Image (cartoon, helix red, strand yellow):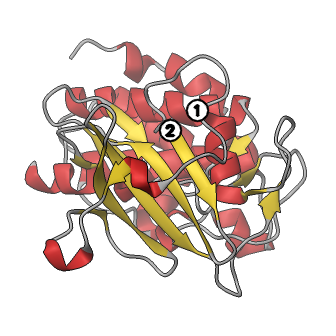
């Protein structure tokens, strides 16, 4: 990956008034667009992020001469080491005084997992859900191994190739460096907030990641987000659902325990029997 040498002249990004193809919904800080790298016609995603008054700080990374915007830094760290196809690749970036630009790989064809699940009728069969969750869990594991706390693993932050079913984790904008001490604020999505934050106002990174994976799995196999009654039954290890295998229900009960200490460990998830099932 090139550092600080990027010029947008190297990329063909259509002007907005010419039906720019937006890959991600516009958020409060910026937008993501399709583009082509001129030297080889490679399809890429160009992400513009505005630096507002509430924008989160930069981070020092060894080997870089200046502090790097946090989202860029986390994406760099998540990609440090052997290539992991389940994590979006950062190809280039440039930091400016009031915004920064990221050039990211752009899988094609692809759509968000949210759109993909919607086209499947709002839920996935277990075989397909298993294939998706195996990749998402691997991405979450690698991020934590590389000291990256994504903090916003959800349907719309996962891209899926609808032909190969390859999944990629994107958007580190809500993330932080993974640490062993507690976090006292939450910047992810409300539906995925771990209960310990509501109860005690603090949480740890890995158990929160496990919780988000549980919410994600629940949504894609049940077709809705867990209700208070669901969470109560899960806590008591009594939750089940017609049409779901016993192992799937057991995994959900292990992921969605109210007390963090009672949840399955992140490193143990892929060893669960549900992932070794053949049906």
Can the viewer see residue 258? Answer: no
Seen in the image, is 182 located left or right of residue 9?
A: right
Residue 59 percent location from the top left of the image: 82, 55
Seen in the image, is 75 located left or right of residue 39?
A: right
Tell me which residue sits at (52%, 77%) in the image: 29
Disc 1 element? loop
Tell me the quarter of the picture where residue 261 sits.
Answer: top right
Q: Which residue appears farthest toward the bottom when viewing the image?
A: 53
Sequence order check, earlier mark of 2 and 1? 1
60 in relation to 2, above or below? below
Quarter in which the C terminus is drawn = top left
Callout 2 environment at 10 Å: few (<14), some (14 to 19), or many (20+)? some
Viewer-closest of 39 and 187: 39
14 in relation to 244, above or below? below
Quarter in which the N terminus is drawn = top right
Disc 2 element? strand
Callout 1 environment at 10 Å: few (<14), some (14 to 19), or many (20+)? few
- Label 2 with label 1: CB-CB less than 8 Å: yes
Tell me which residue sits at (53%, 17%) in the image: 271
Residue 34 percent location from the top left of the image: 28, 55
Residue 136 percent location from the top left of the image: 44, 35
Tell me which residue sits at (64%, 78%) in the image: 98
Question: Badge 2 is on which residue?
Answer: 91
Question: Badge 1 is on which residue?
Answer: 1
How many marks the image carries: the answer is 2
């Amino acid at each position: 990956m090139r550092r600080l040498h990027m010029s947008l002249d190297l990329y063909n990004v259509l002007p907005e008034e010419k039906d720019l193809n937006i890959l991600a919904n516009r958020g409060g800080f910026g937008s993501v667009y399709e583009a082509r790298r001129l030297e080889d016609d490679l399809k890429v995603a160009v992400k513009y992020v505005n630096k507002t008054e509430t924008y989160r700080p930069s981070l020092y990374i060894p080997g870089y001469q200046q502090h790097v915007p946090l989202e860029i830094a986390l994406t760099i760290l998540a990609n440090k080491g052997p290539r992991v196809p389940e994590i979006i690749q950062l190809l280039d970036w440039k930091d400016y005084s009031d915004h920064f630009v990221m050039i990211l790989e752009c899988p094609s064809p692809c759509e968000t997992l949210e759109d993909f699940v919607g086209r499947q009728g709002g839920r996935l069969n277990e075989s397909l859900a298993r294939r998706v969750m195996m990749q998402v869990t691997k991405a979450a594991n690698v991020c934590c191994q590389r000291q990256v706390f994504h903090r916003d693993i959800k349907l719309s932050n996962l891209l899926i190739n609808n032909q190969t079913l390859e999944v990629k984790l994107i958007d580190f904008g809500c993330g932080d460096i993974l640490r062993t001490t507690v976090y006292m604020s939450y910047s992810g999505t409300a539906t995925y907030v771990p209960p310990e934050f509501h109860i005690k106002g603090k949480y740890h990174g890995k158990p929160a990641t496990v919780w988000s994976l549980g919410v994600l799995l629940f949504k894609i196999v049940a077709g809705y987000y867990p209700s208070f009654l669901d969470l109560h039954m899960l806590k008591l290890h009594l939750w089940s659902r017609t049409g779901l295998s016993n192992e799937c229900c057991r995994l959900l009960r292990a992921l969605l325990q109210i007390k963090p200490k009672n949840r399955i460990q992140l490193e143990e998830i892929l060893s669960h029997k549900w992932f070794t099932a053949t049906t």
